[in-house]
Image: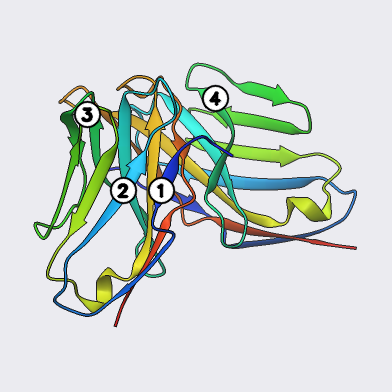
Amino acid sequence: GEDVEQSLFLSVREGDSSVINCTYTDSSSTYLYWYKQEPGAGLQLLTYIFSNMDMKQDQRLTVLLNKKDKHLSLRIADTQTGDSAIYFCAESSDSTGGGNKLTFGTGTQLKVEL
Amino acid sequence: DSGVTQTPKHLITATGQRVTLRCSPRSGDLSVYWYQQSLDQGLQFLIQYYNGEERAKGNILERFSAQQFPDLHSELNLSSLELGDSALYFCASSEGQTSSYEQYFGPGTRLTVT
């Protein structure tokens, strides 16, 4: 079955880069996602990468995918206090019924200190 | 704002009761998904509907059911509620039914069972 793992906490100083890591088990995953959840809020889609890509850059965000090791990372450049949140990695898999679902990791709490 | 709306925002009810959570997808989206977020289970996929038809099913309890109506809004019905059903319930929507379409999440309904 699918399983997604993330480290629970990451603390960085404002202005530094943050790197949040994720490992997954389902080799049939087609898309991998990063979502952000701020306190009391829903999940905000940050970025995603197709499984045949190695890297995707979107402004301050860089996603790296190592498909062989089933390892995904999210790098946030010039981290700001507003980036403090929980970051979820998720893998998307298609079901036999024609639908799909997201399997989420446990989430990484990012704390940005001044 | 993702464009996905959920009502109510908060719900407090007693054990044994039944509640209905409502979701309106983004304009143009045909798929609706339900997820449960709890402290012990994390974020878990419950069920997906596409244009009124069930397309994928996760670990949804038999006490829970969902449907998607012709106007594409969806309802999640939770019955015989137990303390352990207390959680944040998210609805998400996407344009299509497969994993190639990104999912956008609503703000969630916080259910408290006392």
Q: Amino acid at mark 2?
A: Arg
Percent position of residue B3, x then y: 51, 34
User: Could you tell me how far apart the alpha carbons at marks 4 and 1 are, in whole angstroms?
Assistant: 28 Å
Q: Which residue is mark 2?
A: B22
Label drawn at residue A95: 3
- Image marks 3 and 1: residues in contact by CB distance under 8 Å: no
Chain ID, mark 2: B
Q: Amino acid at mark 3?
A: Ser
Q: Colour scheme of this structure image?
A: rainbow
Q: Which residue is mark 4?
A: A49
Q: Amino acid at mark 4?
A: Ile
- Looking at the image, which residue sits at the far left? B62
Q: What residue is shown at x 34% (from left), y 49% (from top)?
A: B35
Residue B73 found in image quarter: top left
Report the side of B75 relative to B10 (left or right).
Answer: left
User: Could you tell me how far apart the alpha carbons at marks 3 and 1 are, in whole angstroms?
Assistant: 26 Å
User: Could you tell me how far apart the alpha carbons at marks 2 and 1 are, in whole angstroms?
Assistant: 6 Å
Chain ID, mark 1: B
Report the side of A42 relative to B80 (left or right).
Answer: right
Instruction: Give the crowd class for mark 2: few <14, some 14-19, many >=20 residues within 10 Å.
Output: some
